[in-house]
Image (cartoon, grey):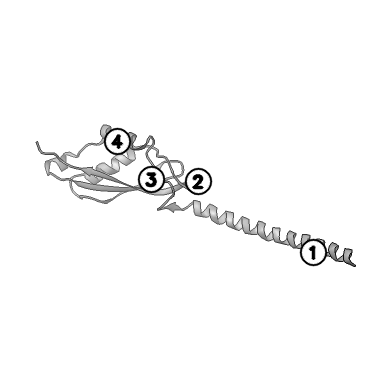
């Protein structure tokens, strides 16, 4: 009698395991689909932010070479910090560029937008080890010096 009980327990255990693995497989598929949908969203916060290729030093070289203080702003002594927001896609391309704050006169906002458009591809943000589409906000400080 003891042998039959053990055999029936083994058969029951393997049947339960087979049913459980089907549920797990289905749950994994649902979870995987949910995670894929999550990675297709545009992130506002990520583990690693999108960055300009070559880091801060390369970004400063780019700005030194390409930033032009608008004549209208110079002539009217307009200064300030302009924040430009944009999206860095999974492939590093930028889109949806807009000025979210800063002086509205003098062309400072337009200059910030022009610079982001000119900046080329960025290094994408990383979330859970994967490249993701994410928002990036960059400040541009325009300051006139006297003398």
The earlier-in-sequence mark between 1 and 4 is: 1
**CB within 8 Å, label 3 to label 2:** no
Please report the residue visible at 85 percent of the width from the left and 62 percent of the height from the top.
7
The earlier-in-sequence mark between 3 and 2 is: 3
Please report the residue visible at 18 percent of the width from the left and 42 percent of the height from the top.
143
Rendered image quadrant of residue 115: top left
- The disc label shown at residue 12, or none: 1
Give the residue at mark 2.
Answer: 130
Question: How far across and down, in percent of the image, does residue 77 sit?
Answer: 12, 44
Question: How far across and down, in percent of the image, does residue 37 sit?
Answer: 52, 54
Name the element at disc 4. helix
The earlier-in-sequence mark between 2 and 4 is: 4
Question: How far across and down, in percent of the image, does residue 60 sit?
Answer: 29, 36
Name the element at disc 3. strand
Question: How crowded is the residue under tag 3: few (<14 C-alpha within 10 Å), some, or many (20+)?
Answer: some
Question: How crowded is the residue under tag 2: few (<14 C-alpha within 10 Å), some, or many (20+)?
Answer: few
Task: Work out whether residue 14 or residue 88 is closer to the camera in this orientation and state it.
Answer: 14
**CB within 8 Å, label 1 to label 2:** no
20 on left or right of 58: right
Question: How crowded is the residue under tag 1: few (<14 C-alpha within 10 Å), some, or many (20+)?
Answer: few
Q: How far apart are labels 1 and 4 at the CA level?
A: 68 Å
55 on left or right of 81: right
Q: How far apart are labels 1 and 3 at the CA level?
A: 57 Å
Q: How far apart are labels 2 and 4 at the CA level?
A: 27 Å
């Amino acid at each position: 009698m003891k042998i039959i009980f053990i055999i029936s327990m083994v058969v029951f255990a393997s049947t339960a395991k087979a049913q459980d693995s089907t549920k797990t497989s289905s749950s994994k598929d649902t979870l995987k689909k949910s995670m894929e949908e999550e990675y297709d969203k545009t992130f506002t916060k990520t583990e690693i932010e999108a960055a300009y290729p070559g880091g801060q030093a390369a970004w400063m070289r780019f700005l030194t070479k390409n930033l032009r203080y608008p004549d209208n702003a110079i002539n009217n002594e307009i200064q300030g910090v302009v924040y430009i927001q944009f999206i860095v896609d999974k492939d590093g391309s930028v889109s949806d560029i807009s000025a979210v704050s800063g002086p509205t006169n003098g062309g400072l906002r337009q200059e910030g937008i022009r610079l982001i458009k000119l900046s080329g591809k960025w290094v994408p943000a990383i979330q859970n080890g994967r490249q993701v589409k994410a928002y990036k906000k960059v400040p541009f400080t325009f300051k006139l010096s006297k003398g």
